[in-house]
Amino acid sequence: MSRLGTLGARLYRGEVGYDFVAKRKIWYGVSILITITAIVGLAVQGLNLGIEFKGGAVFTTPSSSVSVSQAQEHAEEASGHDAIVQKLGNGALRIQVSELDQAQANKVNEALAEDLQIPVEKINAEIVGPSWGEQIANKAWTGLAVFMLLVVVYLAIAFEWRMAVAALIALIHDLTITIGVYALVGFEVTPGTVIGLLTILGYSLYDTVVVFDGLKEGAKDITKQTRYTYSEVANRSLNGTLVRSINTTVVALLPVAGLLFIGGGVLGAGMLNDISLSLFVGLAAGAYSSIFIATPLVADLKEREPQMKALKKRVLAKRAAAAAKGESADDSDAAQDAIPGDAATAGAVVGPRNRGRGRSSDKR
Amino acid sequence: MAAPNRGRRPAGAQGKPGRTLVLILIAMVALTGGMFWAGQLTPRLGIDLAGGTTITLKAKSQPGQENAVNETNMKTAVGIIERRVNGLGVTESEVQTQGDDNIIVNIPKGTNSQQAREQVGTTAQLYFRPVLTYAPGTPSAPQPTPAPSASAGDKGKGDKGKDEKDKATPPSGTPTATPTTQGRAVTDALKAPTPTPTPSGADKPKSSEPPKPPPSGDAAGAAKLEKQFTALDCTDKKVRGALGDNVKPSDTALACGKNAAGEWEKYILGPAEVSGKDVDDAKGQLDQQRGMWIVTMDFTDSGSKKFQKITSKLSQQQPPMNQFAIVLDGEVVSAPSVNQTLTANAEISGSFDQESAQNLGNILSYGALPLSFEEQSVTTVTAALGGEQLKAGLIAGAIGLALVIIYLVAYYRGLALVAILSLLVSAILTYTIMALLGPGIGFALNLPAVCGAIVAIGITADSFIVYFERIRDEIREGRTLRPAVERAWPRARRTILVSDFVSFLAAAVLFVVTVGKVQGFAFTLGLTTLLDVVVVFFFTKPVMTLLARKPFFANGHPWSGLDPKRLGAKPPLRRSRRASTPTDHPKEA
């Protein structure tokens, strides 16, 4: 803990730092690779859709001595369809049979009751029409589209359009990764998954917004100095908010992990598990993208601005001049590649941040 | 929402943190008090946690009425279904629209869900049609079963006994015979609601000829209809299901219905004369004088006129054509005979028991939906399963909370106290508001909502982290705690507002766009996000201000989480801020 504590301080002072922005190409590459894997997985393997999307019946029996394989045998015999049987934490069984209608389900229910020697009324039967899950999914897509639109507008107003675009790309990136993980691992997709996926929306952006907020502040009055380029300032802010990002992610992941591993893991599958699984994957992806993708993207977009280009030119010219004079060569080194843990080089990036902060508090 | 950075303007609570704290304390006490006052100590549990049945209905657009599925009709339908469900004696059922064309009916456990389903799911179109003829419900040629018995005690064959007994009991006043026939579905008599006892009970010699063709309509159509009628097998569910489809109220129609013995009967029915919309009110009630269950009906103004017309016509007819059938979605629920002209009020008497009388009453009062619906899914959830999931969720939530607290204590040490207290305040507010929203807006805590609440622990804790990191940043710049707390606030405030706004936006969009379970989740997320803002503004910040005055924190005790040395503040500590230029540069380099 205290090591992490000092890490915060060292990050803050810029004694350590990782040049996320300069090495962005690597991370873009990693992300593109992940995205391609996800798309290929989705195309080849497809999603393992739950019965909510296919239609069918779920029977839940009370705790009994019936084994999973016995129950599966009986269920398949009674229904003539494939059955998925899961043992819940308390010994209860969850039997899913796809493609059953109400009448068939009633028959299967009775047959199961007889085979498993459980009173009929103790078996919980749930009929799900295929259009039900479909409808939830359709609403989810609508929700996603509406949300993305609103959030882009909002971020464009609160920050600027470049940040909005970067945040949106990061968000799509998170969703792709999450769906890809589902396709590759073969986790079942249920309405719970869809709910979890939609929650990632807010969460993924939460992290990104915290980072952007720091960046916006750090980049204030950036054109009035000639020491650092926008990318360097962006990286500086990113490192400055790194501890915050890590902490918020850890704190968000802990309860979700509790839900996933304790709630779901011990007590068997169910909606809790579905929601927490997709949240867990999505949150992790969200933390990654806010650091490695969103901010470097903003820097990329910003560097295209004429004034930022001019700034870069001025900064480089000044560094060249300084190098020619032979003074503080470290400055120019820092601009090119900051080595993590190297206090001398990264320290150079402290300037604008402190200055920006000092100024902003002086004003008004 | 991006709060403008007001810079040095003192934050609202800076001067008098005590006031804000008292304010939030009052709010907490008021909410808790309100909870006790309302007698609602726990949040209302959703159907998935308490057990019950959820029925999802989807509106079907009828051929030729594609525009019928609209908001107005959906609203009317919800109203009708609601009355109908609560007509079952259910108090906590919820009926709500979902999206454009779905109606969700939540029926808590302890209700006869089968009965509810029958009434809710299948009841769509109700008509009163004159009976033209009827026969036993199998495709064989109608069996002539003459049962020419006129005595009240005559049981006829088997199933008629109960019916006749009911009718035979009262002493006869008006000499109107209620014709009942062997094997007939019609067990009811219709008359004016005067307490005049019905002197029925006599089986009327029924004509044993094959069913007569409908008197109206062209001969070919009639012949075709009769052929269909002969072939009709009412015991086949699919056949029955198909009967009600695509039949216009103005057509002559085939229909099936069960008689008192539960056997299927088939009917040829004339064009609908009265629709369910014409019924103002109907209920099954016990006629004290006769000691039997009857169904009373009140008609609307226009309904009265139509009803008068049909009854005056029918009462002139010979059996079986003196009956009208109450047809619900193509199925005859009752076919009382008429023996006098009736107007606004009428009653149906016959072989009712309490349940069947009340059922028919419900069907009549709430019969006519503007749309027809099909069942999408029926979910039965036992309380045990939901309870187990709730338990799992709560255990998981508690463990998640414990992990968060451990992490916060490990990382923020003394500051974690503030975070934990804030989480506690947030939890109390969330819980009391949820409990109060139960009776207030019908909020029910379902499983996804529990999940949302657990996930929200993270959101709430995030805000403190943002603020704490800001304070530590200020300390790293060499400030002492009190100015650091105040200077960190405006910036942390903006970050918290911006990011909470994004969270809230996500929750709001989810809530508006999605349906059912997802909504509960979105609502909880939105609520906790709002409460997060409230807690951070009115609790965390003032508490920080107060704590900053305590030597333990102000002097940076190693366990305060604000030890300047540990945080790497630059010595010497100064009260004023440093020069704004990065003079420290060379030193670091």
Image (cartoon, coloured by chain):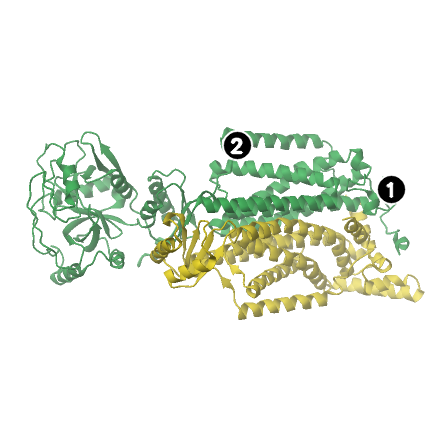
Chain colours: A yellow, B green
Query: From the viewer's perspective, is residue A233 above or below residue B169?
Result: below
Nearer the observer, B309 or A262 = A262
Q: Residue B93, position in %: x, y?
A: 40, 41
Q: Is residue A244 left or right of residue A115?
A: right
Q: Mark 2, mark 1: which one is toward the viewer?
A: 2
Nearer the observer, B457 or A113 = A113
Q: Is residue B587 visible?
A: yes
Nearer the observer, A216 or A336 = A336
Query: From the viewer's perspective, is residue B271 above or below residue A323?
Result: above
Q: Residue A268, position in %: x, y?
A: 52, 53
The residue to which callout 1 is attached is: B573
The crowding category of the residue bearing disc 2, from other C-alpha atoms within 10 Å (few below 14, some 14 to 19, many at least 20), is many
Q: Residue B446, position in %: x, y?
A: 49, 45
Nearer the observer, A357 or B483 = B483
The residue to which callout 2 is attached is: B35
**SS at badge 2:** helix
Residues at marks 2 and 1 touching, judged by CB atoms closer than 8 Å = no
Query: From the viewer's perspective, is residue B41 above or below residue A77?
Result: above
Q: Is residue B104 left or right of residue B562?
A: left
Residue lying at 76% horizontally and 40% vertically, measured from the top left: B485
Q: Type of residue at label 1?
A: Leu
Residue lying at 69% horizontally and 51% vertically, measured from the top left: A210
Image quarter of residue B268: bottom left
Q: Type of residue at label 2?
A: Met
Q: Which chain carries label 2?
A: B
Tag of residue B336: none
Sequence-first tag of 2 and 1: 2
Q: Is residue A219 visible?
A: no
The crowding category of the residue bearing disc 1, from other C-alpha atoms within 10 Å (few below 14, some 14 to 19, many at least 20), is some
Which quarter of the figure is the C terminus of chain B placed in? bottom right
Looking at the rendered structure, whether the residues under marks 2 and 1 are on a common chain is answered as yes
Q: In this view, does B96 lie to the left or right of A173?
A: left
